Image (spheres, rainbow, N blue to C red):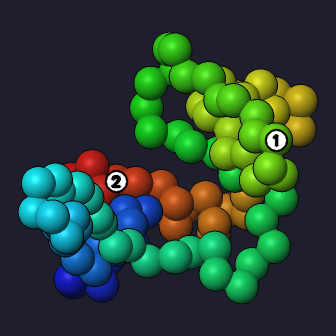
Amino acid sequence: YELGSQTCLVKVFGIYQVIIRQPNGHREIQHNLMVTENLNFGRNISHEYNLKGSLLTRFTTTTDDGAEEVMLGPKFFKDMKNSPVYFSKDSKHNLQSAVTNDIN
């Protein structure tokens, strides 16, 4: 990334630990946060998938509050069978180069 190579890895801006102490001093809540680049800002995303590796025991629950559902890996493979995504030769080459860079 620092050399300008293509990458699919998310840009991490910082990792922080936030500790919230109760006024009485008896209890504290600790949160570990990672701040990353938001690739979805200003875009209309119709389908979003979480493709982090494992295909086993990956289920989602639907929310009653109307929140958008993030679909997991098995749903991606099922959707691609029914309605594949096509790439131009240049886009395919760029994606393959980025994945190769990330693996290396």
Q: Kindly identify which numbered label has been placed on residue 16.
A: none
**Element at badge 2?**
helix
- The answer to whether 49 is drawn above or below residue 38 in the figure is above
| Amino acid carrying mark 2 in the image | Thr
Q: In this rendering, which labeled residue sits more in front, label 1 or label 2?
A: 1
Please, which residue is most extreme toward the left here?
25
- Measured as percent of width and height from the top left, residue 35 is found at 34, 73
The residue beneath circle 1 is 64
| Amino acid carrying mark 1 in the image | Asp
Residue sitting at 62 percent across and 23 percent down? Answer: 59
The quadrant holding residue 62 is top right
- Measured as percent of width and height from the top left, residue 95 is found at 52, 60
- In the rendered view of the protein, which quadrant contains the N terminus? bottom left
Residue sitting at 55 percent across and 22 percent down? Answer: 58
Left or right: 44 in relation to 94: right
| Real-space Cα separation, disc 1 to disc 2, in angstroms | 40 Å
Contact, CB < 8 Å: mark 1 with mark 2? no
Residue sitting at 83 percent across and 52 percent down? Answer: 66
The quadrant holding residue 92 is bottom right
Please, which residue is most extreme toward the top here?
56
Task: Pick whichever of labels 1 and 2 is earlier in the sequence.
Answer: 1
Mark 2: few/some/many CA within 10 Å (<14, 14-19, 20+)? few
Left or right: 30 in relation to 46: left
Residue nearest the observer in this picture, 25 or 102: 25
The residue beneath circle 2 is 100
Residue nearest the observer in this picture, 67 or 95: 67
- The answer to whether 58 is drawn above or below residue 6 in the figure is above
